[in-house]
Image (cartoon, coloured by chain):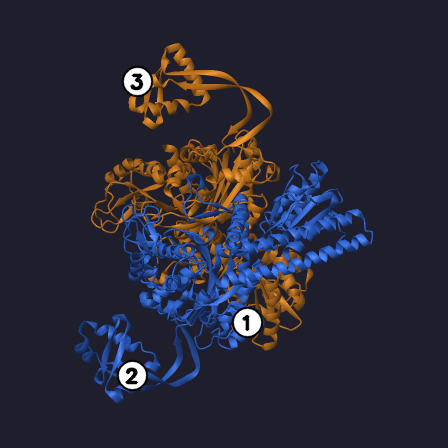
Chain colours: A orange, B blue
Amino acid sequence: MLRHLVRVRAIARAISSHSIPLPFTFPHSLSSSPFPMAAEDSLRKSLADKLAAVEAQGNAVRALKASGAPKAEIEAAIEALNALKLEKTSIERSLVGGSDTREAFRQAVVNTLERRLFYIPSFKIYRGVAGLFDYGPPGCAVKSNVLGFWRQHFVLEENMLEVDCPCVTPEIVLKASGHVDKFTDLMVKDQTTGTCYRADHLLKDFCNDKLQRDLSLPAHKVSELKHVLAMLDDFSAEELGAKIRDYGIVAPETKNALSEPYPFNLMFQTSIGPSGLSPGFMRPETAQGIFVNFKDLYYYNGNKLPFAAAQIGQAFRNEISPRQGLLRVREFTLAEIEHFVDPQDKSHPKYPEVADLEFLMFPREEQMSGQAAKRIPLRDAVSKGIVNNETLGYFIGRVYLFLTRLGIDKDRLRFRQHLANEMAHYAADCWDAEIECSYGWIECVGIADRSAYDLRAHSDKSGVPLVAHEKFSEPKEVEKLVITPVKKELGLAFKGNQRMVVEALEAMPEKEALDMKAALESKGEVEFLVCTLEKTVTIKKNMVTIQKEKKKEHQRVFTPSVIEPSFGIGRIIYCLFEHTFYTRPSKAGDEQLNVFRFPSLVAPIKCTVFPLVQNQKYEEVAKLISKSLTAAGISHKIDTTGTSIGKRYARTDELGVPFAVTVDSTSSVTIRERDSKDQVRVDVEKAATVIKEVSEGQRTWEDVWSTFPHHSSTSADD
Amino acid sequence: MLRHLVRVRAIARAISSHSIPLPFTFPHSLSSSPFPMAAEDSLRKSLADKLAAVEAQGNAVRALKASGAPKAEIEAAIEALNALKLEKTSIERSLVGGSDTREAFRQAVVNTLERRLFYIPSFKIYRGVAGLFDYGPPGCAVKSNVLGFWRQHFVLEENMLEVDCPCVTPEIVLKASGHVDKFTDLMVKDQTTGTCYRADHLLKDFCNDKLQRDLSLPAHKVSELKHVLAMLDDFSAEELGAKIRDYGIVAPETKNALSEPYPFNLMFQTSIGPSGLSPGFMRPETAQGIFVNFKDLYYYNGNKLPFAAAQIGQAFRNEISPRQGLLRVREFTLAEIEHFVDPQDKSHPKYPEVADLEFLMFPREEQMSGQAAKRIPLRDAVSKGIVNNETLGYFIGRVYLFLTRLGIDKDRLRFRQHLANEMAHYAADCWDAEIECSYGWIECVGIADRSAYDLRAHSDKSGVPLVAHEKFSEPKEVEKLVITPVKKELGLAFKGNQRMVVEALEAMPEKEALDMKAALESKGEVEFLVCTLEKTVTIKKNMVTIQKEKKKEHQRVFTPSVIEPSFGIGRIIYCLFEHTFYTRPSKAGDEQLNVFRFPSLVAPIKCTVFPLVQNQKYEEVAKLISKSLTAAGISHKIDTTGTSIGKRYARTDELGVPFAVTVDSTSSVTIRERDSKDQVRVDVEKAATVIKEVSEGQRTWEDVWSTFPHHSSTSADD
């Protein structure tokens, strides 16, 4: 039974559920508190870098003055120096500010995202619905770019079989997967008003609040509360209820008494067809659609293993009380891969292509012993068995490449191994790609070796064998252990429970069966745990025969293992927004301007085109370039408003547009790069080609910068 | 109230509902029966073409023989001749066969689609759910290509604002749109078993059956039944119930009595959050997500009109009893555009780019007078006012280009104007792009000028004005008609109905108000229809003042009109499957092989790469080419099985793969085109580039054919 629960909680954790809370968190962080440390480390490093940059720029200014350089050049250098100083101050402030700064930073990002319509609270004119968000035009473009790259990086490069299944799912499928019974969160109700709360949230808030406000708490009380926070995910309904009672926790708004915690199923329920007799649910994940199609997909792949199937689609989760903005939502886009392999051979032919990668990993061992995540070469992690197998290692490497190419900061990305108590009993190994943002370390991708669990569950429920075959070149003589329950004796002994005992006996793994055989032969009887009965029964010698038999076999029939990388697209995008956001002073120095430093790959628009001044000739040139860009499939925007060029740049920087073409003559134009603000002059006819090359990655900006004449900022920059 | 109903039925019709039934259908087809005519015409034309081709090829064979050409060449020509004869025979059979042939053709297409996993009945191992389908790997790729091209053709080229809203929608939004009250089909229940049926389906089946089987029916009865079929969509619940009683229609399986028809809401209902107090629905269309965001999107567009917003996403419709396979499903992908314009200026700057197109149009007039659809230049249709305005005409043209570029046969595509009784009262004009397939003419795209209806509905319900502003350069003196109901008098006269009368008076259009003013002045009273009361009341002179007043205005505030092209992506794809499917004889002539002639743009895989024989050197070359193709982003598949080359070609033809690279040396390879089966020899290093160019449309196959040496089929073809 536990297995379902764990599978489901693992899903929950990986995709749309609670991220690890701040500042007190999972066991591994009790002693090391990795998040604030990492954030602080990273800030201190930035500060050191910035101090060095300030010094270097100071020297440059002095050198320029000494050499009697032109006034404009000196002024430009001073301006750059001032900008650096401002950035330095801002980092210092962050270091002092701590969580206030994190809040302020998040607010700055979120304000920009909402103001520029990266996203919009859904149904806003009707006062919205918690946990539902729209992607507005730039957000939608970013999402479409991320998904496009996902398809290229995984589906196309790995020749995966992509499928597209409906969201509406009949009950039986989710019964088999365990979601109907176990996809729940524990909920308490305000006894008077009926308002619902997540039980663990209330307890967490209580403990955090107590720890932060009550500085006179005795040490043993502090450690008790920290322990509660660490154990939060493992409490049963009864344990949670007891804590809530012990601490006298009441409904936050009304102070009314609360009900006992009880499970609330997180699936949106509906009814298929008009009869009302066919319950259905909106799928909580896309994976099940792949599992139920295994047989067809295996056939499509020429009955060969390994192969991977993939699906991108909406998933739904009826959160009790969504918090954390875009990170915990009621509807989200998942991209999931199910890679089916022979459990006896989990090697991967392309593993060598990623084995040399090195990145932050956080193995179980380090978490338990209170150490921090550390940089480990993937090759070592696999060869030392820290990562269970090559295929799992291969996907970890591919996920790392995927995320960093999108623009996720590699220093704020780590792969954290699941602890034993987080993992389903059938899982061989599981790693989460966690990205650090203002909410802490957020699980954005789960990469699990789920063994044969899912296919077996659907085989059992549907009666359709979901298996693979390995044909032997010639028949093999094999010794097989045959377990034959003696039903008559079992029936006499266990009556109505006979079937459950028979099934449990037949399902024994080889080693357990051999142990039983030995025990029966020596002692005549043995105690045997029947999980489905939740108790131990006594098996006597006459109730079962266990013996090895020789058989000729022509093929091996087995249930494949599945390795499942599962991507929460919305979470990745939100973290990307935080990682690429920065501010810099305006030219006049009177305000901070927002910038998203999106790589071209994900930028919502690759380029803006605008005439320097409103003028028919320039507008015609702008239209010409726009037409070429459209033909080349480069998304862009023309801006013919009369606003100052500086404001127009600021506007596009805030959307993360990497390049701007300014038309200031009819023969050549300037192309400006967003982050460096460098500008080059390019002939009108070449402009679209240069933009295409540099935004599609066939050419770097450095290359463009060294090829074309530079343009001084006086005429066209801010 | 009717307006909601009609809106909703228009949606239903356009996207996921009943196509026009065969063989008896909508009013316009009573006399002309356009579908079978068009199908027959098209077949006769194909037959004439094929006869000419047979004759030409016969002459070619004779000429070759006379000139003493090499034996191989003559044999090839004879083979081609035999193939043409076979195709001719197949068309002749189609012409004779009629509907049986249509059924057989559909079965051949559907078998191929299912066998090759273009689609899979969802949850098949659990015996499936009616109306739910998965796209398997090739189907998923086709869908992704169609959506990618849609984005390129509409969103990118028109600079539309794409948004992405959730499927879960709170009740209030769909209450405003009218779906909660009116998105229904009429249902009857088997009184004993409770099985549900669509009332109109039972009546339709009864009439069709009667007409087909009972050849002794008197003429007046035949015409009555035909009339019923024609009116099917317009019957009220009472009228349908009366017909079912009159004709003694019972439940088809059990022969039990049926209930009276009653409306069944077609939305999947659910509940948002844990309280059970917030009803929600799975959206029945994506459009509402755009309307509720109008204010933000207008602001994002710099408060300028016109602009278009677009959305691609899942929509849901809980069909009572889905029929017609992939055409009527419970979950489907919609792509919708809402183009907002000033109602006083519906011109479109890019209209001239499509004005010269000419295609099959089926205006209201022709339908009513029993004529057939005819080819009309778009320019004429717009200038003569057949199409209401330029913007609507522009989108009709763009839809035509979109569909034909996907591979829809232009001779089986027509734009049918809605009849007055099909259209909502507020709609200015509405055209459906209908595609002919084995089920008849299927509405695949609806293009409607919906005036200001949707924005007004959400303004009213939410209290948030969804309007646009036109600032005047200087204040304008305007004469405005002011309608002032005298509430006291109206209250005395109409008591509880006063409010409804006041609202109706205030809402009068200018012309109606002026007529009323004149009538009140001459006669002292006037009859006035109050829709919300569903009756006429008498308005007396003392109950309202109507007069023109002069005012200074600084801006015009108005609700924009919306022009809505709405695409049923699944329907388009299914029709595309039928239009691109054909069979041709195998080389041995012993079987018919299936081919999808997908354009490269939509082909699921652009290219297969295979070594002619299993051989390490060839496999290395194949891998090299595969790697280049991956780098170029060209989807492809390596096939290293030892199957005969002919079988491998047949396998890829059946998936619609346009090109095949066969490795038969280490220096050069052959590239084969699917439909012509022509082959050229290309150097190994150039192969990937040629495939990229020809599959992305930078180069035609004709060009490749005339550039590279031809390869005789003996070594590598079937």
The quarter of the rendered structure image containing the C terminus of chain B is top right
Q: Which residue is mark 1?
A: B376
**Relative to A151, A199 lies left or right:** left
Mark 3: which amino acid?
Leu
Do dots 1 and 2 share one subunit? yes
**Mark 2 or mark 1, which is nearer the start of the sequence?**
1
Q: Position of residue B352 (x, y in %)?
A: 57, 73
Q: Nearer the viewer, mark 1 or mark 2?
A: 1
Crowdedness near tag 3: few (<14), some (14–19) or many (≥20) residues, C-alpha within 10 Å: few
Separation of disc 1 and disc 2 at Cα? 42 Å
- In what element is the residue under mark 1? strand
- Residue kind at label 2, given as amino acid type: Met
The answer to whether dots 1 and 3 both sit on one chain is no
Using residue A268 as the reference point, say whether residue B692 is left or right of it: right
Q: Is residue B562 above or below residue A569?
A: below
> Residue at the bottom extreme?
B522
